[in-house]
Image (spheres, grey):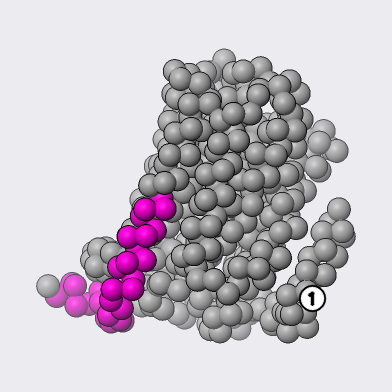
Amino acid sequence: MVVASGFFFAVNVGEIGMDRQWWQSLYGLPPLIWIVLIGSFFGRGTYFMVWPFLAILLHEKFALGPANIGLILSVSAMVATLLGFYAGTLSDRYGRRNLLILGTAINTCAFALLALAESLSAFIVSITLCSIGRAIWEAPASALFGDLIPEQRCRELALQFRYFLVNVGAALGPIVGVWAGLSAQQSTFGLTAVSYLFLCLGFVWAFRYTTSGLAARARRNPATSFRATVRVLQQDRAFLIVVLANILTLFIYAHMDSSLVQYLTQASAPGLIQLISSMILVNATTIILLQFPLLKLLGGLSVNVRIVMGVFILAAGQVWFAINPIHWFYGWLGAAFVVSVAETILFPTMSIQVDRMAPDHLRGSYFGATSFYTFGWSSAPLVGGFVIEWLGGSALYWGMFLLCGVVLYLYRVSSQFQSASVPAAVPANAGEEAANT
């Protein structure tokens, strides 16, 4: 399947007219970027062998209900949100290296602990550490693309390719897990720990021995301060509205993850493990096969228009989830396909959107602000658990359909802000000026 996906991928790249130039752009990426790309692939692949089944593990091991499972998953992720924002600012001020190494080291320890945890408290601590580690290293990793790839088209292509590799890993993870008998087994988290260990060691090596690593290590803005960054973000109203809209978008999308698992578990859907694995496979395969054709099809449209189209498709998926009969196996796969098409359009475009809006010297801070997306993602299991327990799964997804309308309104307001005025450039010494005020 890896060979087939790679072949299909190459064919589609040729179709969109980027063939040789496209491959040359990727071939010329700095080693540090390749470490991020490859690490994202292996980390996500081993992660998806078992993480989607975590709600089932908690239910079977500790007899927890949907509300309690949602509370654990939500609170642990929310703890890491502000830390992720602060980590982005720290990476602007002190450089990316230390944050990347620290975050991946925490993830290594967290997933190793999760593989061995026996008590509920150990599960809660390890799940929280998983969220903290990812929050620390994700923003600096995304900012590296802007630091080391100056040409915008090549940079956006690299961001698209990272998303592609993440989903190849997500597609192969459940398949390898089922083939090897690893899916839904707690010990599989040990493989994720090993993946993050190698990623951590890769960062240590690259920052010390490669030209791009030494350049990235030297790139920092000591004048940047957390207070000044907050002030800059407060003034960028269009960006703040975009962040709020994306928080809600992630909240809506996340109900295809743990909330749907809880809904199907509570409703005793037949073939639950097979159904969840199949939906994960549909999700990742859809993105693998459609990401670059959709890039060609929608390439002439603005970022905001692409996102609006994605939200409309996401809304259609929520309706399908709401009306699909519990026992219709292929209906769930169809709904997952529709939501996956929306994801294919939305998620890479969100990263490109932030990259375009961020000032060069505050790129880490702007990507750090995207850690607030975690409020959307992490609150979904909590809200979803309570709604499913009290009102049922159908009510949850009808509510998400209505919330899509709120997201569309926010994007309209953001577009009005962007078209009404061009934000003034943020001075590189913003932190120093704020410190003197």
Q: Position of residue 325 (x, y in %)?
A: 65, 24
Q: Position of residue 433 (x, y in %)?
A: 19, 77
Q: Position of residue 205 (x, y in %)?
A: 63, 70
Amino acid of disc 1: Gly
**Above or below: residue 62 compared with residue 76:** above
> Which of these two is toward me, 11 or 318?
318
The image quadrant where one finds the C terminus is bottom left
195 left or right, relative to 353:
right
Q: Residues within 10 Å of mark 1 (few under 14, many from 20)?
A: some
**Above or below: residue 22 compared with residue 258:** below
In the rendered image, which residue does mark 1 sit on? Answer: 14
> Which of these two is toward me, 340 or 78?
340
Asked whether residue 276 appears in the rendered view, the answer is: no
Give me the residue at 44% from left, 34% from top. 399
Asked whether residue 178 appears in the rendered view, the answer is: yes
Quadrant of res 414: bottom left
Quadrant of res 20: bottom right
Magenta segment boundaries in residue numbering: 407-436
**Above or below: residue 158 compared with residue 132:** below
Identify the main secondary structure in magenta: helix
